[in-house]
Image (tube, rainbow, N blue to C red):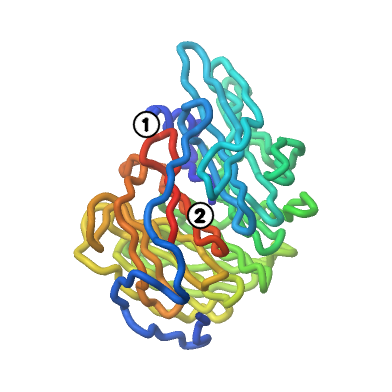
Amino acid sequence: MNSLRLGLPLAFTGAIVLGAGACSGPGMTPSGGGVPATRYGAVRGAIGLGPVLSTKLGGTVLGWDMNQNGNDGFLTEAVLREHNVTFGTETFDETAATVTKLVNQKTVPGGNDEPFAEAVMGSDVGFIDVQRTVVHDGIIHRDDGFRLMNPVAGNRVNGTSSPRKSSGLEPNFVTNNQSSPIQAMMAYRILRDFKQGVDLYVYDSAANTWIGPHAFPRQQVFAGYALYAAVDARSGNVFVSYQTGTGNYENLPPRFDVFDGRSGSLLRHFDGLGKGFLNGMAVDSTTGVLCTTTFGDMNVEFYDDSTGKGFVVKIPGQGGPLTQGAAVAADPVNHLFLIAQQNSTVGGSGSAVLVYDEQGDLVESITGFSFLNQFSPIPVHIAVNGTTRIGYVPGPNANKLQSFTY
């Protein structure tokens, strides 16, 4: 999950303005493009939109995530007042879609020290980026702090974390791998020539230790709103995508770097499929299947992450603005991938969640969503619990999260 930043000033500023199956292994081939179905696997409860979760203070949701192995989630919110901002950190019940506890509340003049709920990691560890700007030698730059809720179900902010060389760092995306402690954080860094560099950190959420940063060479171009990464808990490998080559980067296929999540060392590369930078990425660690969506087409890509070989299927319907597949969530219990689509092409109005199996079949589509502010520079986040088959997405308003069943 999942913080989605642009390397700009605090995410809060934009948020208020905008809305105050196993894989067949090497040589993978799809079993078909698929036709939407209403059920997958065993008989289960009704699918569709569930109850809506509202923030406790009525403020804009800044960041959020859910426990994939329990029933607790957490979020942070912001309430804009005349001369200050009130921030809240709270936990919620996934099934009931209700706030469990307002864990922390703080009013800050000017809105600095913004808590952004990044991800639930490992064994229910909540990771919060406290975004802070400071002035040094007349220049405004970032100097964030990092807080922990360990566990989220404990309803307390009770720890801190300290990545190396964090001054000037602007975190953009943090993984929510809950099958092992290994995590990845992608971040922008302002360089001496005032250009942006991109760094990768590897984090052990159980030991609270960091490796990195790994600074990517400038010929590796990171385009798009989110610097996506994914972790295969089984192999311990971290996957990062970027663009390279000549021409329009929005039409070039992505390329992947694979890192050892235990040492942080670069292991290998492989060429990707589709066109343009990634709109989403997730891994089913039980099968080693990596699923992505790309900006320049309506493709969904599936890879064997041990070989880099894969195949492409196309989202049904005719493409248009923001009909590409967006954020991706893995369900390793049922071996499914759930993909957010801002503008539905599978029937119904508004936004959609598309459910694919690992052979590339579209087995289910859920419509009727209204993902918050579809022209926002903050991409939609989607998270699921495979055991309960409950998921969450943002919306329908800035202070709400929409639950659903699949």
Which residue does the numbered mark 1 point to in the structure image?
Answer: 19
Cβ–Cβ below 8 Å for labels 2 and 1? no
Say whether residue 90 is left or right of residue 209.
Answer: left
Element on which disc 1 rests: helix
The foreground one among 52 and 162 is 52
Q: Residue at x 55, y 72 (%)?
A: 269
Q: Nearer the viewer, mark 2 or mark 1?
A: 2
Sequence order check, earlier mark of 2 and 1: 1
Of residues 21 and 300, which is closer to you in this image?
A: 21
Residue 164 position within the rendered picture, expressed as x and y whole percent measured from the top left? 73, 45
Residue 357, horizontal then vertical, whole percent: 43, 74
Which residue matches tag 2?
383
Residue occupying the point 29% across, 75% down: 35
Q: Secondary structure at mark 2?
A: strand
Q: Residues within 10 Å of mark 2 (few under 14, many from 20)?
A: many
**Does 86 sit above or below residue 265?**
above
Q: Three-letter amino acid code at disc 2?
A: Ala
Q: Is residue 309 left or right of residue 181?
A: left
Residue 211 against residue 40 in the figure, above or below: above
- Is residue 329 toward the left or the right of residue 260 in the image? left
Q: Using the rendered view, name the quadrant where residue 243 is placed.
A: bottom left
Q: Residues within 10 Å of mark 1 (few under 14, many from 20)?
A: some
Q: Is residue 11 visible?
A: yes
Q: Amino acid at mark 1?
A: Gly
